[in-house]
C-alpha cells in the first residue's frame, strides 16, 4: 500500500482535503493529521476491524485504549459518566487545547477524551459523523511526531493518508490527566503545567438558588463572597441563579438596600436561570425551599449529595428549614429573610 500525502495549511485547511480525509476514514482507512501538539492518527472508533488495525500499525498493547476526539465540550457527556464538577471546569478552561482527560465510561471502564484546537483536527471531527480514535501518529515508544516527515518515517505504507501541514504549533504532547478523582493525577506531562491543572482542581464552586434570582440567592451569594474575602479565601467561586428566573432582572430594591447596609453593591446584578451546565459544574448547590430542591433533584440525578437547603447550615436551629420568599411582602419580611440567610452563611463559610 502506498501512503498519499496532501499538503495543507493547518490554520486554514481546504474543505476538499477535510472531506477527503473523512472519506478515507469512512472506508476503514487510517489518516494522520496535525493537531496543535503532535500529529494524530485517526480511525473510525466504531469499526472494530479498523481499531484492531490501528493497534497493529502502532504496535501498541491491546490493553491501552485510544483517545477519542471531540469537537464540543458538551459532547463529553456522550462518552463519560459520573463526571466530577472539577473535571467539567478543567475542560472548560483548557478545551479546545492540549489536554487529554481520563474519565469513567458507560461500561465502568475508562475513556480518554480531548478537544483539539487545530482547525484541521476539529474540521475532521465535526464532519465525520462518528467518534474518531486518535493516538499519536507514530510507533508506540517512538519520538513525538511533530512533523509529517516523522510520520512518514514510521508509518509510510501503513496508513492511507497523511495531511502534511509542516511542524505542529506546540511540538509537545497534550497533558494527560486522570479526572476521576481529586486531587487530579497527571499521567503524562505535556504542554499544560501540572500546577495549572491542580489550581483548577483545588477550587470549589458554590451555587445559591432561589426562585427568581432577585433577592434570596443574591443575598446569600453576596454575603458569602464578603465573608470568604474577609478570611482571605480565593479558592471558592460563588454564583447565584433561580429555578424560574427571567434573564437580566435586577436585584429587588429591598435586597439592594439591605446589602448596601453591609457595604455590598449589587446594582449590576442580572438574574439568570439555573441551567444543567451550571449545576454540573457546581460542587455544592444551596436552595431556599424544598420545592426548589425537589425540582432540581427530580430533573438532574447527578445532584445527589450535592444539593441542600441553605438553612440546614444555620447557626440557629429551627424545625422550619425553609427560607420564605419575601418578594412583595415588605421590608420587615426581607429583614427576617436576610437574618436567616446571614446566619446560615456565617456557618457555611467555616465548613467549606
Image (tube, rainbow, N blue to C red):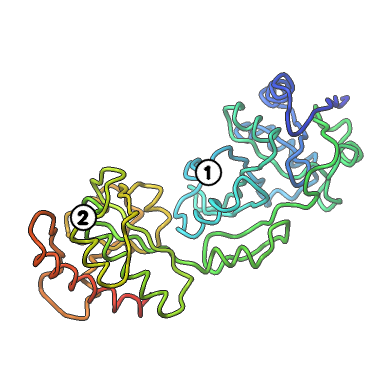
Position of residue 19 relative to residue 310, above or below, is above
Position of residue 213 relative to residue 351, above or below, is above
Position of residue 132 relative to residue 349, above or below, is above
In this orientation, which residue lies closer to the viewer: 229 or 110? 229
Residue 329: percent from left, percent from top: 7, 58
Please name the residue shown 55% across and 69% down the image: 183
**Side of 196 where 285 appears, left or right:** left
Q: Which residue position is annotated with label 1?
A: 73
Cα separation between marks 1 and 2: 35 Å
**Side of 14 where 109 appears, left or right:** left
Q: Residues within 10 Å of mark 2 (few under 14, many from 20)?
A: some
Residue 170: percent from left, percent from top: 78, 49
Q: Which residue position is annotated with label 2?
A: 252
In this orientation, which residue lies closer to the viewer: 283 or 344? 344
Quarter of the view holding residue 90: bottom right
Q: Residues within 10 Å of mark 1 (few under 14, many from 20)?
A: some
Please name the residue shown 29% across and 79% down the image: 347
**Side of 119 where 215 appears, left or right:** left
Residue 59: percent from left, percent from top: 80, 45
Q: Which mark is residue 307?
A: none
Quarter of the view holding residue 185: bottom right
Q: Quadrant of the C terminus?
A: bottom left
Total numbered labels: 2
Residue 312: percent from left, percent from top: 22, 72
Amino acid at each position: 500500500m502506498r501512503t498519499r500525502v496532501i499538503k495543507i495549511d493547518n490554520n486554514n485547511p481546504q474543505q476538499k482535503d477535510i472531506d477527503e480525509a473523512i472519506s478515507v476514514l469512512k472506508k476503514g482507512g487510517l489518516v494522520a493529521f496535525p493537531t496543535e501538539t503532535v500529529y494524530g492518527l485517526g480511525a473510525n472508533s466504531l469499526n472494530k476491524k479498523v481499531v484492531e488495525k490501528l493497534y497493529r500499525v502502532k504496535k501498541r498493547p491491546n490493553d491501552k485504549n485510544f483517545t477519542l476526539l471531540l469537537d464540543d465540550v458538551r459532547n463529553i457527556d456522550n462518552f463519560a459518566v459520573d463526571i466530577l464538577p472539577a473535571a467539567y471546569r478543567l475542560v472548560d478552561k483548557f478545551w479546545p487545547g492540549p489536554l487529554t482527560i481520563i474519565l469513567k465510561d458507560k461500561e465502568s471502564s475508562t475513556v480518554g477524551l480531548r478537544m483539539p484546537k487545530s482547525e484541521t483536527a476539529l474540521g475532521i471531527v465535526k464532519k465525520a459523523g462518528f467518534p474518531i480514535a486518535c493516538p499519536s501518529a507514530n510507533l508506540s515508544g517512538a519520538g513525538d511526531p511533530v512533523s509529517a516527515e516523522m510520520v512518514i518515517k514510521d508509518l509510510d505504507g501503513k496508513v492511507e493518508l497523511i495531511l502534511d501541514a509542516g511542524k505542529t504549533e506546540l511540538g509537545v504532547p497534550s497533558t494527560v490527566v486522570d479526572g476521576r478523582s481529586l486531587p487530579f493525577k497527571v499521567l503524562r506531562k505535556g504542554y499544560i503545567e501540572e500546577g495549572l491543572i491542580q489550581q483548577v482542581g483545588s477550587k470549589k464552586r458554590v451555587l445559591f438558588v432561589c426562585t427568581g434570582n432577585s433577592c434570596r440567592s443574591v443575598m446569600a451569594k453576596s454575603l458569602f463572597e464578603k465573608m470568604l474575602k474577609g478570611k482571605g479565601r480565593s479558592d471558592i467561586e460563588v454564583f447565584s441563579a433561580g429555578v424560574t428566573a427571567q434573564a437580566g432582572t435586577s436585584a429587588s430594591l429591598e435586597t439592594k438596600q439591605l446589602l448596601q447596609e453591609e457595604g455590598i453593591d449589587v446594582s449590576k446584578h442580572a438574574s439568570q436561570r439555573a441551567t444543567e451546565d451550571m449545576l454540573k459544574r457546581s460542587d455544592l448547590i444551596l436552595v431556599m425551599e424544598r420545592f426548589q430542591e425537589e425540582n432540581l433533584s427530580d430533573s438532574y440525578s447527578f445532584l445527589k449529595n450535592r444539593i441542600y437547603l441553605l438553612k440546614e447550615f444555620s447557626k440557629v436551629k429551627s424545625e422550619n428549614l425553609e427560607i420564605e420568599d419575601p418578594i412583595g411582602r415588605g421590608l420587615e419580611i426581607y429583614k427576617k429573610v436576610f437574618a436567616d440567610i446571614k446566619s446560615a452563611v456565617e456557618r457555611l463559610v467555616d465548613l467549606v
